[in-house]
Image (spheres, rainbow, N blue to C red):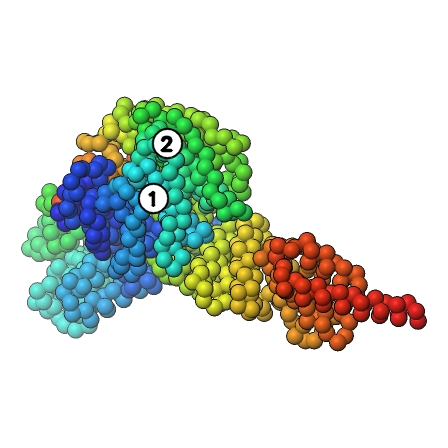
């Protein structure tokens, strides 16, 4: 049985584009077309507005929480071509502003905490930026990858630190190369690897027949397997698997009735939430024999999962 | 699973974000913008899947079965070298007794409950666990227990009697009253027949003795037939072959008595005779007296093939299940499971069990014990043995589920730890996101992490706690935050390896700055006892030594204090912002009555003063220069005196 335990009234004056829970699941950050970012404390079933961040001058597309070992940091990206990193020290204030893109910044993602405080973002100008905090100087260093995807980049996601190089012992390996996956308007998914102080295109995955809307690298379970989920305007969700992070095998999870906009992996990477233009969120799980099954569907009005009548004896 | 969401908030597209495990949030998400702001109800829904096992009344079940599970893992370890079947049977019984206690508790609570809805849910739990116990018992008989000679009948009868105790009470009442003419009791015959089909021949005969016409020939004949029925016993000294011959002979005799029509005046006695010769239509005729076909299973096997072995039970089950006008009625879940079990299709059994709404408790524990008993062999479509994988995936799922609970998480962790390496990695992912509400929670997490060798996690917890403590102090409050930050940072490095160094540095720097601003050193006692941990970071070392300097100075051990201070100055590990403090600390020592600094020391301090002119200049620097020069003079004089002697 599923219960709605709480309803959070966001008070945004326009459409919400993203909602992200912090590391501990105690705070929710939302962003909207009303140019604002809001943070709610959602402890013990009640929610209070903790902050209303105004600093963008355009719709805010996405927000991302940093690892708490770096303090309470939130990054946001907007149509106004800017990325803002907010910090809480008593009050929420602007810690750093990055304005190195020539068009809307569509997605932000913090690197695995093991690598340090590093933020990746991508833009409609087709380029990516990797922004690294330099502890000693207290400055931010920016590396830009120009012309990553033609027409624009929609989504960016980091490879978990532990499975970065699957040929090494997954638990002790620290020096594995950093990897990033991106999805763009050229219908491609690209994997980027850091080499020296450069980022090089390591792989391009071709499968989708329309704009790739979201890519998400699955959390690593310490196994010799890496997994990426991608979704596209072509209504398909594809799961890419690899045992060496170099050669990738696609499996079509499903072809939906409408454009698929976003993907979210559960904490241990065993469930994938898919949300699409058909007002539905469905949850998918890989069975022991490698098949992807829909375990639940949440939709406006009614949703139904198989085996409903068998759930009780 | 059925979810109905308030419609209005989903005029827009929906998206989902995961919280922990059974919780997630749904929000209306849009990828596009429009020129005019769209006024919509921008609500975010926090959604949780209800977990039966998190009901407080089931806590005991979860905790106790955890103990048994862990004992079972140990037993499985020893079973690798020696046969441990007896131990497995003991543990299986332990599981069942835990379930039975749980059912009793539920029944008790249901009896007390006044709220109708709650009462109903408690009763539905009873039904669930009742079925679980029933299936587990049968599984134990068929797969865990080592039955002598593999003759399952006595065990099967025991199972039927235990779980489907029909007529038992009436039989007891009648026997206790012990009145001739008991046939007037409305359930007399049903009870006698019930005892026959449960294989309780002695009870059936005792009941028949209470009938007023017990002395008639018909009664004597049936009683005689029941009495003379051969009963197989593995220790009886005869082979199954011999037994089969004598049993068949007995049944042939019964059959001939029946065909002689001597019983035609007593239809009930005739029915009993038909039952004991295993007449299908006789069994069929009484099927409607019982709610399920399980009631008849024991009797059917007893009177058709008492020598049946485990693998022969499938046919008996099929016969009994088919014995009914109600065959058309929908089969219950329990039906399907018992059938699959008797057919020996454990894969199907586990599949069915997984559909039960006990959140995998049963499937996990049963699969685990069957796996360790070596009785489970499940092949996938490529004929690869996936039994271990199935067991692991169930244990992982169950462990992860418990990890989501605010107090059962350590139980969940113990399950995950039995599935290396994936289990511990999953545990790590979940644990590092466990909210650290308090120091106590963090300490507990730390202890568990160490127990399972999750050192990286332990370090992460310490670093986060350290960062948080600094954040608390960020507003410029007292030194308590810095002290806590230092303590956590030092603890982060306690486990060895890398990671906490930076945190140590950060916290130590904050402490030094705090001293500069307020003149009080936080966590002095911690630093004085930190010992080798001080070596973790230069700034921390400086802080520790500087603390020590203060202690010596307070104890008026000025010589030692001076020596330490000079070594701190000459080692040049101090950050720029701390030079002023260090240099000015020499002043009282330079001015003291006793000579503290030698001329070499004084030269060193002078040199540093000039090198660090950016840190200390103006009036204060001049004052210090003067003191240094005066001290140099004193030191030179003292040096001449001592060399002149």
Tell whether A244 sits left or right of A121.
right
The residue identified by callout 2 is A182
Which one is nearer the viewer's eye here, B58 or B577?
Answer: B577
Instruction: Report if residue B126 is visible in the image.
Output: yes
Q: Dividing the picture into quarters, in which one does residue A215 lie?
A: top left
Disc 2 crowd, CA 10 A, few/some/many (<14, 14-19, 20+): many
Q: Dividing the picture into quarters, in which one does residue B161 lie?
A: bottom left
Residue placed at 56% from the left, 61% from the top? Answer: B512
Q: Which mark is residue A76?
A: 1
Residue placed at 43% from the left, 53% from the top? Answer: A71
Disc 1 crowd, CA 10 A, few/some/many (<14, 14-19, 20+): many
Q: Secondary structure at mark 2?
A: strand
Tell whether B80 sits left or right of A208.
right
In this view, A78 is above or below A196:
below
Tell whether B393 sits left or right of B39.
right
Which one is nearer the viewer's eye here, A301 or B105?
Answer: A301
From the top left corner, tell me how far across and down residue A158 is, in percent.
Answer: 41, 37
Q: Residue most toward the right?
A: B645
From the top left corner, tell me how far across and down residue B214 is, in percent.
Answer: 14, 64
Q: Nearer the viewer, mark 2 or mark 1?
A: 1
From the top left corner, tell me how far across and down residue B422 is, in percent.
Answer: 44, 44
- Both marks 2 and 1 on one chain: yes
Instruction: Report if residue A16 is visible in the image.
Output: no
Tell whether B108 sits left or right of B188.
right
Could you tell me which chain the residue with mark 2 belongs to? A
In this view, B335 is above or below A101:
below
Residue placed at 32% from the left, 32% from the top? Answer: A103
Residue placed at 50% from the left, 40% from the top? Answer: A170
Instruction: Compute the Cα span from label 2 to label 1.
Output: 18 Å
């Amino acid at each position: 049985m599923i219960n709605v335990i709480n309803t959070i009234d966001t008070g945004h004056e326009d459409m919400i584009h993203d909602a992200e829970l912090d590391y501990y699941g105690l705070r929710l950050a939302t962003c909207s077309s009303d140019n604002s970012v809001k943070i709610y404390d959602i402890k013990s079933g009640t929610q209070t507005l903790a902050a209303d961040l105004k600093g963008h001058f355009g719709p805010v597309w996405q927000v991302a929480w940093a690892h708490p070992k770096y303090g309470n940091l939130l990054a946001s990206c907007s149509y106004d071509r800017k990325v803002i990193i907010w910090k809480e020290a008593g009050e929420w204030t602007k810690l750093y502003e990055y304005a190195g893109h020539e068009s809307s910044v569509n997605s932000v993602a913090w690197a695995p905490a093991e690598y340090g405080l590093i933020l990746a973002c991508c833009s409609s100008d087709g380029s990516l930026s990797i922004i690294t905090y330099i502890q000693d100087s207290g400055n931010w260093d920016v590396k830009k990858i120009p012309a990553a995807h033609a027409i624009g980049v929609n989504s960016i996601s980091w490879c978990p630190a532990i499975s970065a190089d699957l040929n090494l012992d997954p638990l002790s390996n620290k020096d594995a190369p950093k990897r990033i996956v991106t999805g763009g308007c050229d219908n491609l998914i690209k994997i980027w690897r850091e080499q020296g102080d450069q980022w090089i295109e390591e792989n391009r995955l071709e499968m989708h027949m329309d704009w790739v809307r979201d890519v998400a690298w699955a959390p690593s379970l310490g196994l010799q397997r890496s997994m990426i989920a991608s979704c596209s305007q072509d209504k398909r969700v594809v799961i890419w698997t690899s045992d060496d992070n170099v050669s990738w095998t696609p499996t079509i999870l499903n072809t939906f009735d409408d454009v698929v906009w976003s993907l979210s992996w559960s904490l241990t990477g065993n469930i994938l939430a898919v949300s699409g233009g058909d007002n539905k969120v469905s949850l998918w799980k890989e069975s022991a024999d490698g098949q992807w099954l829909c375990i639940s569907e949440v939709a406006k009005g009614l949703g139904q999962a198989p085996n409903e009548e068998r759930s009780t004896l | 699973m059925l979810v109905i969401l308030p419609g209005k908030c989903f005029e827009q597209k929906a998206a989902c974000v995961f919280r922990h495990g059974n919780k997630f949030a749904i929000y209306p998400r849009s990828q596009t913008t429009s020129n005019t702001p769209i006024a919509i109800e921008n609500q975010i829904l926090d959604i949780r899947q209800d977990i039966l096992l998190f009901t407080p009344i089931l806590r005991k079940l979860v905790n106790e079965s955890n103990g048994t599970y862990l004992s079972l893992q140990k037993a499985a370890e020893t079973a690798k070298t020696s046969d441990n079947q007896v131990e497995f049977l003991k543990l299986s019984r332990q599981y069942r007794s835990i379930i039975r206690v749980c059912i009793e508790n539920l029944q008790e609570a249901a009896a007390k409950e006044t709220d109708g809805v709650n009462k109903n849910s408690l009763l539905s739990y009873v039904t669930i666990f009742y079925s679980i116990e029933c299936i587990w018992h049968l599984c134990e008989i068929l797969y865990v227990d080592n039955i002598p000679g593999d003759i399952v009948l006595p065990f099967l009868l025991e199972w039927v009697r235990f779980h489907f105790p029909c007529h038992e009470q009436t039989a007891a009442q009648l026997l206790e009253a012990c009145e001739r003419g008991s046939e007037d009791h409305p359930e007399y015959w049903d009870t006698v027949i019930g005892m026959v089909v449960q294989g309780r021949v002695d009870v059936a005969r005792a009941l028949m003795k209470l009938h007023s016409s017990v002395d008639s020939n018909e009664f004597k004949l049936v009683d005689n037939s029941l009495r003379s029925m051969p009963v197989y016993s593995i220790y009886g000294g005869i082979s199954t072959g011999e037994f089969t011959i004598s049993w068949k002979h007995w049944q042939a005799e019964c059959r001939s008595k029946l065909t002689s029509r001597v019983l035609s005046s007593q239809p009930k006695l005739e029915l009993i005779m038909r039952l004991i010769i295993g007449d299908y239509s006789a069994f069929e005729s009484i099927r409607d007296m019982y709610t399920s076909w399980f009631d008849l299973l024991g009797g059917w096997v007893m009177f058709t093939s008492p020598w049946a072995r485990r693998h022969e039970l499938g046919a008996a089950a099929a016969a009994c299940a088919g014995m009914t006008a109600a065959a058309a009625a929908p089969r219950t879940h329990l039906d399907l499971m018992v059938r699959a079990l008797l057919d020996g299709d454990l894969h199907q059994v586990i599949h069915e069990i997984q559909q039960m709404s006990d959140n995998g408790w049963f499937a996990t524990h049963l699969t685990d014990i069957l796996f360790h008993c070596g009785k489970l062999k499940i092949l996938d479509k490529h004929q690869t043995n996936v039994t271990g994988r199935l067991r692991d995936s169930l244990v992982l799922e169950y462990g992860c589920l418990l990890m989501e609970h605010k107090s059962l998480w350590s139980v969940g962790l113990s399950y995950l730890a039995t599935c290396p390496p994936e289990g511990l990695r999953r545990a790590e992912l979940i644990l590092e996101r466990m909210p650290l509400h308090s120091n106590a929670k963090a300490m507990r997490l730390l202890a568990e992490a160490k127990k399972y060798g999750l050192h990286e996690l332990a370090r992460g917890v310490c670093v986060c706690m350290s960062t948080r403590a600094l954040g608390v102090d960020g507003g410029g409050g007292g030194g308590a935050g810095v002290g806590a930050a230092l303590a956590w940072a030092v603890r982060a490095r306690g486990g060895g390896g890398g990671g906490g160094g930076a945190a140590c540095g950060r916290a130590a720097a904050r402490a030094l700055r705090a001293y500069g601003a307020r003149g009080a050193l936080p966590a002095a006692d911690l630093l004085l006892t930190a010992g080798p941990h001080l070596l973790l970071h230069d700034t921390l070392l400086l802080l520790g030594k500087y603390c020590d300097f203060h202690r010596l100075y307070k104890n008026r051990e000025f010589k030692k204090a001076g020596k330490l201070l000079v070594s701190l100055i000459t080692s040049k590990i101090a950050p720029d912002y701390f030079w002023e403090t260090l240099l000015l600390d020499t002043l009282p020592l330079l001015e003291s009555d006793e000579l503290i600094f030698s001329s070499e020391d004084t030269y060193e301090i002078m040199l540093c003063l000039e090198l660090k002119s950016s840190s200390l200049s103006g009036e204060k620097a001049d004052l210090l220069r003067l003191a240094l020069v005066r001290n140099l003079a004193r030191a030179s004089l003292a040096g001449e005196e001592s060399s002149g002697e």
